[in-house]
Amino acid sequence: MSQKIAITGMGIISSIGNNVEENFISLQSGKHGISDIEMFETRHAGIIKTGEIKLSNEELVQKLQLDENNNVTRTSLLGMMAAKEAVESAGISDINGYRTGLISSTSVGGMDITEKYFYSYEDFPEKQKYIDAHDAGNSSLAIADYLGLKGMVSTISTACSSAANAIMMGAKLIKNGVLDRVIVGGTDSLSKFTLNGFNTLMILTDSYNTPFDNNRKGLNLGEAAAFLVLEPEEIVKKENKKVLAYLSGYGNANDAHHQTASSENGQGAFLAMQQALKISGLSKENIDYINVHGTATPNNDLSEGIAMIRIFGENQVPEFSSTKAFTGHTLAAAAGIEAVFSILAMQNSVIFPNLNFKTKMEEFDLTPVTELKEKNINHVLSNSFGFGGNCSTLILSKS
């Protein structure tokens, strides 16, 4: 990279914690957030488990000190929580003091509001004010408005790689002199539409997800939001700011193999990792830990494992784990929360465990880290692969 991109702030809310500290405590203690559905009505309650945040919309509104009569979606509320923490942790007092932008990502958008009022729009015209909230970009604008941000706002929706692509886009905007500082990440809430959709695809487990296990049955959906603050090194030096980590590399590739499935040889994942390593200037031997996409679906874990072997070589794949057994698969937010987890791993010299693993996959000799493990980590590679073959990789570094 021509100039180093520093991460100076981060914020998160997920099923294992309402902020960075709470998430770290849960990761460290092995406390997962997969549970029965309580926060919205569905016929799958008590049957399908999810990574649900046990705060109602009303409680989120109170925490954010918003007007109770707002029409803000749950996706927006979660995003506000995480973005607020990220900005505060970056020590930003004047958000418009530099050319600052927000690149947010979402898959679900305002689906929860649409589900609630869809059948009322024709008979109750006063409910039509909620229609605009459905749009994915509405959540980004709501977050920007909450932060008081006057600069560029953009939205990315590339399924499960969305937040990684938002982070990449933010870095490129800084590198090309378009913006001085960018808040990047993603947010997604649970909804009946999402739950029913993934259930129809038959990739949900009937229990707890088991990434990279030979007997894996599928994923647990989750909801979360996470944002990072990206700043160039010149601002870091000028403001004498603390750096949490650096975004040293990134890559995006699309193998266009299938609407939902990854290619058998992991081509998209392979190309994304290869590109991220090239941009970082690091060799594959420099990677100390991989936060794998690891959805616990039969297709993803096989494809990703093959791609890692192609990149690193047989019996040379770095230590890895999937943190989705803690949070569930949080869709567009996944790469954001896993970037936060990757930074926490580096800061605390620890690899978080791949929960629920019992049996190694028969197709290759790969075993994730299953217990909390102390290790000095300088470079983390984090994978996020989306439907439609949209594969993205981030490399986060201490320096």
Image (cartoon, rainbow, N blue to C red):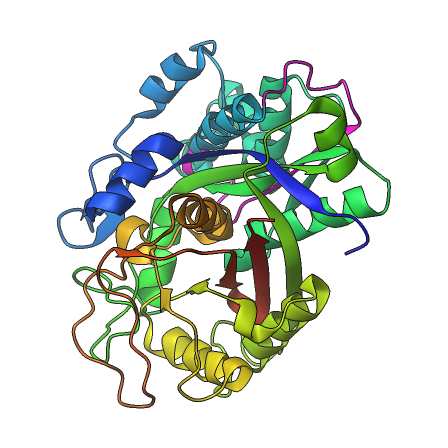
Magenta part mainly helix, strand or loop? loop
Q: Quadrant of residue 29?
A: top left
Residue 356 is inside the magenta segment? no
Q: In the rendered image, is residue 33 in sight?
A: no
Residue extent of the magenta highlight:
91-113
Whole-percent x, y for residue 177 in the image: 86, 41
Q: Looking at the image, which residue is at 80% across and 35% down? A: 179
Q: Looking at the image, which residue is at 33% across and 53% down? A: 221
Whole-percent x, y for residue 40 in the image: 27, 36
Query: Which is nearer the eye, 14 or 339?
Result: 339
Query: What is the quadrant of the N terminus in the image?
Result: bottom right
- Furthest residue toward left: 46
Query: Which is nearer the eye, 183 or 258?
Result: 183
> Is the residue 308 above or below the residue 158 in the image?
below
- Furthest residue toward right: 177
Whole-percent x, y for residue 390 in the image: 59, 67
Q: Looking at the image, which residue is at 63% across and 76% down? A: 271
